[in-house]
Image (tube, grey):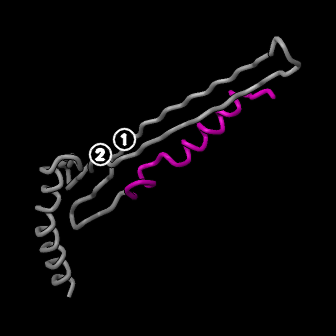
Amino acid sequence: METNFDQLLDKVSQHVKDIVKTETIVGEEFTLGEFTCKPVIKVGLGFASGGGKGVADKSTCHGDGGGAGAGMGMAPVGFLVTKGQEISFLPTSDKKGLQAIFDKVPDLIEKIIEMKKEKE
């Protein structure tokens, strides 16, 4: 049994390329009132492969073996938030970052209500 590790690695890499996108884990860019938010993620990858052959001295047995594996982890890091010409980064791993997002929600809701009233 012969394993073509180059082919295997190409297939795994293509699969990883297809799924490692911000949209996969936290969604696409979105607008909330006057703010535009773009999710940011971090990705970790690991690959391993191995193979072997064996011949027994006292028997007619022969052995072949091979294997490959891959692991991947994705996690949200934060959001790039823009308003007009201003841009800021709100991390998700820091309580202050999450708190900052929640602190801005009342202002956003108020502005959305004002915009709706102006349209009416």
Q: Position of residue 2 (x, y in %)?
A: 79, 27
Q: Position of residue 51 (x, y in %)?
A: 68, 23
Question: Tag 2: residue type?
Answer: Val
Under circle 1, the secondary element is strand
Vertical comparison of 67 with 58: above or below: below
Q: 31 left or right of 56?
A: left
Marking on residue 42: 1
Q: 112 left or right of 57?
A: left
Circles 2 and 1 in contact, beta carbons < 8 Å: yes
Q: Quadrant of residue 1?
A: top right
Under circle 2, the secondary element is strand
Q: Quadrant of the C terminus?
A: bottom left
| Residue positioned 22% across, 47% down in the render | 93
Residue located farthest toward the right when viewing the structure as drawn? 60
Q: Position of residue 118 (x, y in %)?
A: 16, 82
How far is disc 2 from disc 1 in space, using C-alphas? Answer: 6 Å
Q: Name the residue tied to disc 2.
A: 77
Q: Quadrant of residue 26?
A: bottom left
Magenta-drawn segment: 1-28
Q: Residues within 10 Å of mark 1 (few under 14, many from 20)?
A: few
Question: Tag 1: residue type?
Answer: Lys
Q: Position of residue 83 (x, y in %)?
A: 20, 55
| Residue positioned 64% across, 24% down in the render | 50
